[in-house]
Image (spheres, coloured by chain):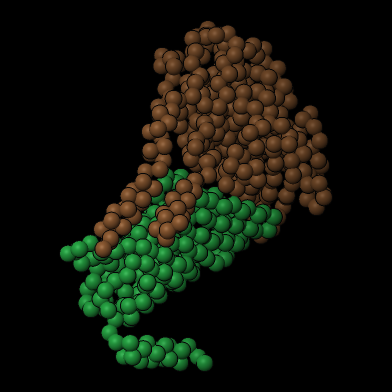
Amino acid sequence: MNARRWTGLTVFLFSTGAGFFGQAEARGTHFLVEPYTGMVFNQGFSRENVVGLESGATIAVGGKLKGFPPRFYLYFRASQLFMGEADIRVPASGALCHVRRSYTGVVGGLRVVIPLLRHLRLNLEAGGGSLFSYNRYFEDGLNVEYQEDLVVAELGAGLNWRMYRWLSLGLMYGYTFVAEEERGDLIATMLEEADQGSSLGWSRLAVTLGFHF
Amino acid sequence: MTRTAKFTFLVVLLSSLDAAAGWDTPGSMRFDLVWEPDRVISNWLDLPAESTELNAEAYFSSDASQFGEQGVLMWAGFNFTVDGAPRYGILLLDIDLTRAPIDGETPVPAGALRAEYLEKWQDQIFFSGELLLGDVWIVDIFFHEDDAGALEGDLALIFADPSNTYPGSRALLRGRFATYPAPSSQRRAAGLTDSNPNSTVHVSSSCSGDVYVADDPGDGCDCGGDDPETSGCEGDTSADSSSVCEAGGSGGCEGDAGSSGCEGDSGSGSCDAGGSSDCATASRPRNAPAVLLGLQRFFPEFIIIGFILFLKRRLRP
């Protein structure tokens, strides 16, 4: 079955499901488990791959203050980013090198859920945590690899469609940046990248599937 | 344990993960390259007379060190030419700083040192060698709990290929490496000022077995006398190689690992000979009270727990 048929079937099931179970209720829940997947864009390493993949899950707990529409959740998120392998010519020597980077993120913060329409909500997030990076550089005769812990902050915004009381589908855009003083990166210096890799940032566009309970 | 308590425990646990400490900083290196294409240089007396002075871009990383957080891997890359043909040299120098004497005089032990040298142009390897002979001296060091450590040192290294795939040798002599910012700058930034601000004499003891005086702390391994062996200043036979601070007549400072007169040296700061007033205070900075540090350390956790308790109270029916 091809992707288009899967998409059609999914939309059909959700549509009929919505009709069967009735309208999604406006009442919120206190807990959320939200797996997500999407694309991540490297904005700190100027000679390396721009696009990578990110997957992860968000767990959140929160509630609503009486007489105030937005809901507040504290969230915890674990993620894995893969930037793939970049084949790069080293500017100083002309040698062909290969760079691989991947990241494991552990962040937490506050999510504000603002109801827009009956089923549509605006999510705003701010948080911080750690990004554990794995970096490998190799060329003929030379192999360097290292892991690094980065303290990061992240901001996010997105729309969320609450299909049922227990299920929602969303699209989130997030930006993660290094929140500590970074004076550079070894591989970025070897590749003469902009700012020696001292200004790192990653933006993320992800599809989320939220389970509310 | 309630659901809220479990979640709180998880958040606190994960937010307590600490960042690694050490060195993660750019820098530079300067040395004389001796290029011997045919034979292996097996001792310091065997060195060819001709050498080329080179400047290299460098990077210092504890994360990449095989010795862990208290080690530092130094990468240096530099362009040069051989008979008009371009070459790119790469030096990888890994030092275990826990075993490195920081007196500027005693070389880093062989077991605490790993070094590789690679010479390429485009995808062709012209030379790849391991450390055959040589020493590294740590001249000045600034430890930092984060990645803002700083380091300065000297080196004299000879490389050869043990498999003889790449014949010949390469020697890096009279080398000086330093992070940017330098240890002295980091000390100043940390508020560790010179104990004697009127002092204009910078004393360094980077040359093995010798002490030299320099007006400029970045002068490198340039011992004040004749060095017949061109071997990175070791075995200096300078006539004025008395172990005293000559300029200004302030004796002592012999073991000072700092290039700026012992001020608040966080590394060695031994200052062991002479008792000069320049070397009076070589102490670490005082820490804030433990309670305040604890409060500061766990401040985010307190906020999170407070928020959860607040929500729980508000949501109680």
Q: Is residue B222 visible?
A: no
Q: Going 38% across and 39% down the picture, which residue do you hit?
A: B296
Q: Position of residue B177 (x, y in %)?
A: 58, 35
- The quarter of the image holding the C terminus of chain B is bottom left
Q: Is residue B262 visible?
A: yes
Q: Going 77% across and 39% down the picture, which residue do you hit?
A: B132
Looking at the image, residue B212 lies above or below residue A104: above
Q: Position of residue A207 (x, y in %)?
A: 40, 74
Picture colour for chain B: brown
Q: Going 53% across and 56% down the picture, which residue do you hit?
A: A133
Q: Nearer the viewer, residue B178 or B62?
A: B62
Looking at the image, residue B87 lies above or below residue A47: above
* Extreme-front residue of the structure: B317
Left or right? Give the position of A12 relative to B228.
left
Q: Going 44% across and 50% down the picture, which residue do you hit?
A: B12
Picture colour for chain A: green
